[in-house]
Amino acid sequence: MGAVLAAVLGASLVGCSSTGGKRAEERAARAAAEGRAAVDTPRWTFAMVTHSGDGDTFWDIVQRGAEQAAVKDNIKFLYSHNDEAQQQAQLVQAAIDQKVDGLIVTLAKPDAMKDVVTKATKAGIPVITVNSGSAESKRFGALTHIGQDESIAGEAVGEELNARGRKKALCILHEQGNVGHEQRCAGAKKTFDGQMQNLYVEGTNMPDVQASIEAKLQADKNIDAVVTLGAPFADAAVKAKKTAGSKAEIDTFDLNAKVATALQDKTLGFAVDQQPYLQGYEAVDLLWLHRYNGNVLGGGRPVLTGPQIITAEDAAELAQYTKRGTR
């Protein structure tokens, strides 16, 4: 909705035609596609600070969405990340010190982020939280939260496993202390009729991830489903399944080109898509709308971008988008 509003508002700024808003919207879309701003508002600076580690394709998609919205909205966009909570908080402080005009942050480990996010809002910097921390977002003073409700997403996984007749599942947590990951597995366990066990792995060490999953599958041949919480870890689970001689179905949160291909060839059973491109795009667009027009979405509740269960039937249609890095 924010993207639509932004396109309409942006179109009105660059001028209306005698045929109405349609032609103006088309001009705005062309300008964005050509790397030109579709609006003539001031060149504000927005910073996004996430808890991403290096090489995470999920966050590449979030960043791509944010960057494309920034071009359209005449925004100078700054992106930084660190998977260590204290370092992430320091990056947020650096953005505050730069007196940015808007701030987008993730709250994977909210206790470490509370003080610095509160400091930003007290300094008059509008904050939007994305991806993680929906429960804490409003309390910390953010305008809104954009992402999926992790508990609801987990519940959807449990229901899908039931529909597939699974009886014993393994939920792989690759980042200890990440509240969103805990909520996903807890949600799945809540609705799953079978048994579900959590397995904590060191997400920064992919060989260790594979070895840990392999050991579990070898030790318990009754495990018939493995759920990973990020697309890169699905591939490790697939390899672990093969070396363990297991028949377990591998399912995952998040979508990328590799996951889409694996869904089509039935290497993976299903994926849970939270539309990361939309999280980045809408965060920038909503900050722009707030600066320009005082808009806020959500009515005090998170703006949900997921979950959407993706199967082999859906993956073929989405493949073109995953290949260009927007899904």
Image: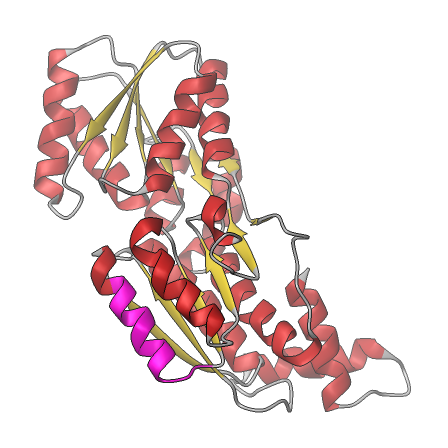
Rendered image quadrant of residue 200: top left
* Residue 212 visible from this viewpoint: yes
Q: Residue at x 73, y 87 (%)?
A: 13
Rendered image quadrant of residue 104: bottom left
Q: Position of residue 42 (x, y in %)?
A: 58, 91
* Residue 54 visible from this viewpoint: no
Q: Residue at x 48, y 69 (%)?
A: 121
In the foreground, 171 or 301: 301
Q: Residue at x 81, y 75 (%)?
A: 22
Q: Residue at x 22, y 40 (%)?
A: 176
User: Looking at the image, is 264 positioned above or below residue 77?
Assistant: above
Q: Is residue 203 left or right of residue 166?
A: left
Q: Which residues are magenta?
A: 88-100
The prevailing secondary structure element of the residues shown in magenta is helix
User: Looking at the image, is 291 positioned above or below residue 184?
Assistant: below
Report how many numbered discs are placed on residues in the image. 0
The image quadrant where one finds the N terminus is: bottom right
Is 138 in the magenta? no
Q: Position of residue 43 (x, y in %)?
A: 53, 90
Is 92 in the magenta? yes
User: Looking at the image, is 221 positioned above or below residue 262?
Assistant: above
Q: Position of residue 69 (x, y in %)?
A: 53, 73
